[in-house]
Image (cartoon, rainbow, N blue to C red):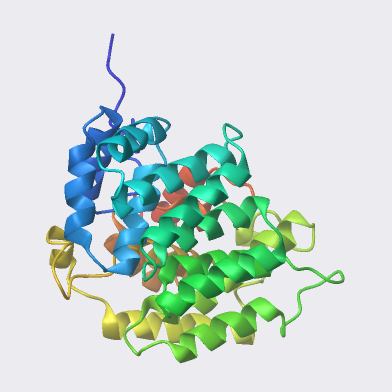
């Protein structure tokens, strides 16, 4: 019998990975070890991560996703009851169990709050609360969790992406509003962030999230290739600004080889590149899309290729064929 592939890895070695770890090889190794009960690897990884809050959030999200993560996090917490890292991992694992209907959302929320009390400066437990509230909470709960994250790390990448997705779902009327709150939110966040912050790409994310909502409501074509959503004047300005930012601030890929070192590339940069490549492709700028897809390599992300109900693997491969002539 052929053994299953490692967690998050594709069965087709030539296809997109769709691995939540993205290109963080240390994270992928620790997650795979955790699935086999070796929580010491996750312990060491999180200790090395320190207060790099974006990287810590990225790593805890990926570590908490596998179905066995909660059991091994509990074992770790029994061994080290005062460990904020063990508490945070258990919180994230329980959040994903709750989203899968295997635990109560109240239990997951309580564990996020408990982890937050153990590390008051850490925005990551509140990121867990926001991940949970994104699917199970009220608008007020989402805003509160986001505000708590931002109070601790103003430019938190994942939290801003989650809030953009939440705000995009507010829909009044039968058309897109160019003054919609998600566009204002994304523009405000991009303007507030430092010049080198990847939040410069957030307006592109907001645009894709609005397309997802509009297409599901039947207000845009279900096939993004048939939509004019990326060809309006406003959209083109947003795409140009984000692409220009990438040209100026994109870092050498060698930074991914040492993801725990100061000055290394952003842990979620591949997320931004997927959104930007998707936008450039549907804007009709295939040369720019090709440059982005080349930099993405196999590290595709389900969003936005799945929008509004597409097979993300098929959509990503089609994008590569259109822009690069390769599947």
95 displayed left or right of 263:
right
- In depth, the one of 97 and 199 nearer the eye is 97
Name the residue at 51% across, 72% down. 148
- Classify residue 16 by image quadrant: top left
Establish if 191 lies above or below 138. Answer: below
Q: Quadrant of residue 36?
A: top left
Name the spot of residue 57 as percent of width and height, x first: 37, 60
Side of 299 relative to 307 (left or right): left
Quadrant of the rendered image containing residue 324: bottom left
Residue at 57% in and 52% down: 132
Q: Which residue is located at x 50 percent, y 46 percent?
A: 312
308, 197: nearer the viewer? 197
The extreme right residue here reads 173
Query: Residue 54's x, y, as percent?
Result: 34, 67
The quarter of the image holding the N terminus is top left
Query: How many numbered marks appear?
Result: 0
Please state if 133 lies on the left or on the right of 179 as rendered: left
- Using the image, determine if residue 94 lies above or below residue 174: above
Which is more toward the observer, 283 or 313?
313
Residue at point 28% right, 31% down? Answer: 6
């Amino acid at each position: 019998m052929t053994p299953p592939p490692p967690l998050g890895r594709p069965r087709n070695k030539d296809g997109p990975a769709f691995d939540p770890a993205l290109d963080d090889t240390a994270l992928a190794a620790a997650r795979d070890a955790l699935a086999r009960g070796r929580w010491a690897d996750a312990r060491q990884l999180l200790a090395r991560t320190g207060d790099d809050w974006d990287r810590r959030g990225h790593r805890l999200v990926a570590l908490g996703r596998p179905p066995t993560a909660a059991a091994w996090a509990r074992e770790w917490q029994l061994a080290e009851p005062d460990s904020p890292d063990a508490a945070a991992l258990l919180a994230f694992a329980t959040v994903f169990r709750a989203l899968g209907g295997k635990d109560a959302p109240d239990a997951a929320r309580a564990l996020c709050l408990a982890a937050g009390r153990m590390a008051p400066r850490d925005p990551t437990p509140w990121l867990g609360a926001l991940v949970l509230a994104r699917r199970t909470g009220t608008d007020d709960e989402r805003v509160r969790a986001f505000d708590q994250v931002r109070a601790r790390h103003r430019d938190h990448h994942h939290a801003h992406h989650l809030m953009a997705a939440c705000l995009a779902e507010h829909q009044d009327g039968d058309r897109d509003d160019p003054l919609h709150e998600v566009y204002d939110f994304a523009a405000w966040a991009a303007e507030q962030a430092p010049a080198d912050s990847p939040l410069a790409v957030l307006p592109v994310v907001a645009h894709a999230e609005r397309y997802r909502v509009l297409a599901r409501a039947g207000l845009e074509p279900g096939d993004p290739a048939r939509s004019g959503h990326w060809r309006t004047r406003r959209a083109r300005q947003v795409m140009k600004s984000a692409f220009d930012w990438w040209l100026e601030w994109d870092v050498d890929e060698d930074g991914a080889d040492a993801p725990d070192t100061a000055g290394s590339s952003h842990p979620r940069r591949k997320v931004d590149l997927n959104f930007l490549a998707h936008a450039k492709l549907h804007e009709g700028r295939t040369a720019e899309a090709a440059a982005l897809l080349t930099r993405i390599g196999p590290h595709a992300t389900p969003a936005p290729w799945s929008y509004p109900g597409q097979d993300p693997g098929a959509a990503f491969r089609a994008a590569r064929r259109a822009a690069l002539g390769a599947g």
